Amino acid sequence: MSEQTQHTEDTRRGVVIVGAGMAGVQTAVALREQGWTGPVTLLGAEPHQPYDRPPLSKAVLLGKAEDSAFDIDFEELGIELRLGVEVTGLRAADREVDTEAGPVPYEVLVLATGALPLTLPGSAGVPGVHLLRTLDDAARLRPVLAAGSPVVVVGAGWIGAEFATAAREVGCEVTVVEAADRVLAGALPPEVTEPMARWYAQAGAELLTGARVASVEPGRVLLADGRVLPAGAVVVGIGARPATGWLAGSGVELGPDGAVAADERLRTSVPGVYAVGDCASFPSGRYGSRLLVHHWDNALQGPRAVAADIVAGGSGEQVYDPVPYFWSEQFGRFVQYAGHHGDADALLWRGDPADGAWSVCWLRDGRLVAVLAVGRPRDMAQGRRLIESGVPVDPAKAADPAVALKSTVL
C-alpha cells in the first residue's frame, strides 16, 4: 500500500472513542472545537443517549429528573454515535477494535471506558442488592426510595454518603455499614473525617464503623458480629476499578491498579491510542507521583489535552498535569476538595467544624498542595489558584479563617 493510499485510509477511519460517558463525549466535542475535521465515532455500551453521572445520586434517584442526558447535538457536530455497542477487544496491529457487531477500524483510538463499581462478595443474584453507577441503576432504586423502605448502605465513602443523603431526604430508615474504623478511610486522614462522621447521626442515619458484612439475604443483611439489619434494599458503594479488562492481550500497558498507564500527554504504550478519564492514570509532575482520579472534573479536563494532541498529529507540547478537583453534596453540606495531600508535611484548620463552615489546608515545603472546603467556596476558589501557582504561603495566616487565602501569599 502506498503512503498516499495509507493516508487516505487513515483519514477515512478517523478518531474512534470507546466509551460514551463524560470523558468520551467531551473528547468528541473537544476534537470539533479544536478543529479536527476527520470522522469521529463515539461507541457507547449503554443504549441510552450519553448522560452525566453526578445527577444520578440525587436528581434522577429522587424523581426530580427523568435522566441527565448531555445537551449536545451529535449529528450537527458530525459525531457518529453508536449506542448499545460493547467493545470486546483491541487489535492494535490492525488498528481495529472488536465489537459484538463486528470490527471498527480507527486512525486514532481514545479509551474512555470509565470504571466499574466493585461488587459485594456473595451478593450476586440476591434480590434487592443494588449498585449506583448507571441510569438503569438509578431507575431501579427510585421505587425503593418512593416506598420508604429501610435501606442498608455498604460503604461510607463519597457515593455511600450521597445515597444515604437522598434516602434520608425522603424519609427512609438508613443504616450505613463501613468495614473500616471511620468514614472516607481511603480518602482523608482521621482528624478530618471525624467531624464528617457526625453528619450521619445529625441526619438521622445510623453509622456502623468497623462492621463487616457476613452475608446478604433477601430482606436483610447479616454482619460478622451476629447483628441482623432489616433491608428493603442494599446499596453497595465500596469503590470502583478501571474498566480495562477488555484490553487483555492488546499491548496497552496497565498499572497495578488496573488503570491504563498513560503518559504526560495521555498517550498509551500503543501508538495512536490515548486514554482519558476514570480508566487512566497519568504522571503528575506537580505531585511527583502517578495519579488515578475517579472524578468528574478529570473527565472534563483530560479530553481537551487529548484533543489538542490529536489535532497536532501526536506531536503536541501540552502536558496534562491538573490540580485534581471534586465535590460532593451530602447531608445538607457542599464538600469540595482540590489537590493531592499524599506527601503534605503540614495540615492547617480554617474554622471550627462545630460552626458548620470550615476548611483544611495541606502544605508541603510551605506551599499549598491541597484544600478541603465545607461551606467555604471562597477558600476553594482561591486555594485552587494557589495550588496551581505553587507560591509559598504564610502558615499562620493560612490557619486564620478570617484571612482570605489569596492574602496568605508570602
Image: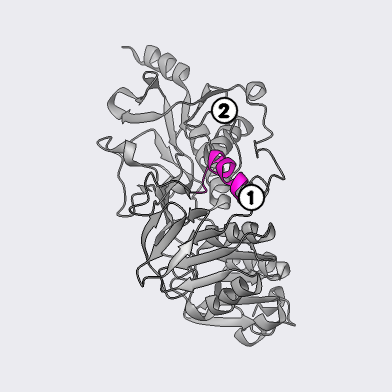
Residue 372's x, y, as percent? Answer: 60, 70
Residue 137 in magenta?
yes
Q: What segment is highlighted magenta in the picture? A: 130-145
Packing grade of label 1 (10 A; few <14, some 14-19, many >=20) is: few
Number of marks drawn:
2
Distance (Cα) linking label 2 and label 1: 49 Å
The label shown at residue 36 is 2
Q: Main secondary structure of the magenta part?
A: helix
Q: Is residue 98 above or below residue 199?
A: above
Given the image, on which type of amino acid does mark 2 rest?
A: Trp
Q: Which residue is mark 1?
A: 147
Residue for point 61% across, 82% down: 349
In terms of secondary structure, where does tag 1 sit? loop
Residue placed most toward the observer, 43 or 285: 43
- Quadrant housing residue 80: top right
Residue 68 vs residue 272: left or right? right
Kind of residue sitting beneath label 1: Ala
Residue 178 appears at what percent x and percent y?
A: 45, 68
**In the image, is residue 370 part of the stretch drawn in magenta?**
no
- Image height check: is 368 above or below 311? below
